[in-house]
Amino acid sequence: MVQEFDVVVVGAGVIGAATSFELARTGRSVLCVDNSGAVGSGSTSASSAIIRFHYSTWDSVLTSWESAWLWWRFSEHLGTTASAALAKFVPTGALTFDFRGTNRDVTVALMRRCGIAVEDLSANQIRERFPALDVADFGVAKRVDDAAFFDDPVGEVGGYFTPDAGFIDDPMLAAQNFMDAAMRGGAKLRLHSKVVEIRRRGDAVVGVTLESGELIDAHVVVNVAGPASARINEMAGVSGEMKINQRPLRQEVHVATPPQNFGLDGTGPLVTDMGLGTYFRPHLGGTMIVGGTEPKCDDLEWVRDPDQFSDQPTTVGFERSMLRLGRRMPNLAIPSRPKGLAGLYDVTDDWVPIYDCSSLKGYFMACGTSGNQFKNAPMSGIFMTALVEASEQGIDHDTDPVQVVGAHTGMTINLGAFSRLREPETTTGTVMG
Ligand SMILES: Cc1cc2nc3c(=O)[nH]c(=O)nc-3n(C[C@H](O)[C@H](O)[C@H](O)COP(=O)(O)OP(=O)(O)OC[C@H]3O[C@@H](n4cnc5c(N)ncnc54)[C@H](O)[C@@H]3O)c2cc1C
């Protein structure tokens, strides 16, 4: 028997779960399918889950700020009780070191325009507030096997602090929370169910085929397959129309133990440090996690098949992280063995995500999340619902872009900024967006 739903969401990561939640809230019948055995077990499970606001474009900054308000009211947003087992926002604030050549002033101005608090900090102020951090200016990021890596600093560096930033303590739980809320709203979930075909009739989608051979009918299909989403777009026959490319990139995140003076209260801020090519944040259990910001000197590990990559950290990657971190944090105790994990980003040409419709009627995509969209999961579900509704009202998003008004600021997010047909945005060209 063929099952029939209004919507099939392909992928049960945090964005697929948030999309299922929002679409189920509108009264549509929703089926979310995932080929893995658990909600959030794709790139969501590897996420550093940082909630920050420093992006290069207006719509990205505003999306992250509006999303933060939904994380802060997560139980209310999901319509559950505050006592439910929910992922939690851990406030830390974010320190961003200045780095010549970045659009720092543009980003700070965008954040202030949204009403986000930003404090400019001199090198001295950073030293006083975060005594574990060396405020040396190391110039541009270098490979750790470059003799110049250990050169003397060229001066000192300031930065800016956004006190409202933080992280979500358990990204997989956050995805499960969205999915539980979606299911309370009537959505169904099928795990161990791989989509192998996007079915179309004429210029409209009519459903999907699962690996088991089962057909599921739906007049709306949303591709939220994370690093595998380019493959799903190929199945839908829409790859040729994409002006923005996407491809999987393997990235490692490592675990270290911070010195005790990392932050005046014992829990330091999350730090973006493009001059060294690194980011780090405190983690639970007195540890910290450290990732990279794709400095130009590093070789990036593009992956051909998103089902085939090692999720274990390498010694080379670990040493690179620790040596860079050690320059910023001189009292760091470096663990003797690599600790951490690796996951895949789904990277677009400009490191801005794609939230869009397509030329195939009823086929939508929330993909190309470029290692920086965990934080925007709450708004991404709202975006996808707005796109589906607009399409059903006969609005052509490609020529008349859908606008979403943020509930907190009352400001407008132009979803055309996340179009597959956009000219690449001017960004840092890194995970920072
Ligand atoms: C190492 C790392 C660190 C990160 N740190 C941050 C951060 O600090 N802050 C931030 O905002 N973002 C961060 N991100 C990015 C963020 O985690 C992702 O943008 C987000 O989790 C993507 O969610 P998703 O639901 O789109 O994809 P995923 O979580 O990847 O989910 C996609 C799902 O689709 C399923 N799927 C794939 N193909 C099929 C198929 N054919 N049929 C059925 N199901 C299929 C997969 O099994 C998977 O469960 C990080 C990412 C990584 C990898």
Image: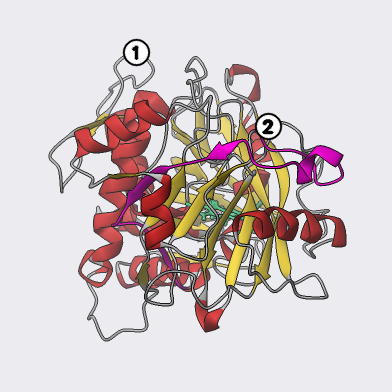
Q: Residue type at mark 1?
A: Thr
Specify the segment rendered in magenta: 140-169
Q: Which mark is residue 88?
A: none
Of label 1 and label 2, which has the lower sequence position?
A: 2
SS for dot 1? loop
Q: Residue type at mark 2?
A: Glu
Residue 388 visible to the viewer: no
In the foreground, 432 or 138: 138
Ligand 1, image quadrant it occupies: bottom right
In the foreground, 191 or 292: 292
Residue furthest out toward the bottom: 83
Q: Quadrant of residue 417?
A: top left
In the foreground, 368 or 325: 325
Residue 160 covered by magenta stretch: yes
Residue at figure coordinates x 52%, y 78% from the top left: 260
Residue 364 place in picture, x, y as percent: 47, 36
Q: Circles 1 and 2: CB distance less than 8 Å?
A: no
- Residue located beneath label 1 in the image: 399
Residue 2 in the figure: left or right of residue 393: right
Q: Residues within 10 Å of mark 1 (few under 14, many from 20)?
A: few
On-image quarter of the N terminus: bottom right
- Residue located beneath label 2 in the image: 234
Residue at figure coordinates x 34%, y 13% from the top left: 399
Residue 78 covered by magenta stretch: no
Q: Quadrant of residue 346?
A: top right
Callout 2: CB less than 8 Å from ligand 1:
no
Q: Which colour assignment does the render follow?
A: secondary structure
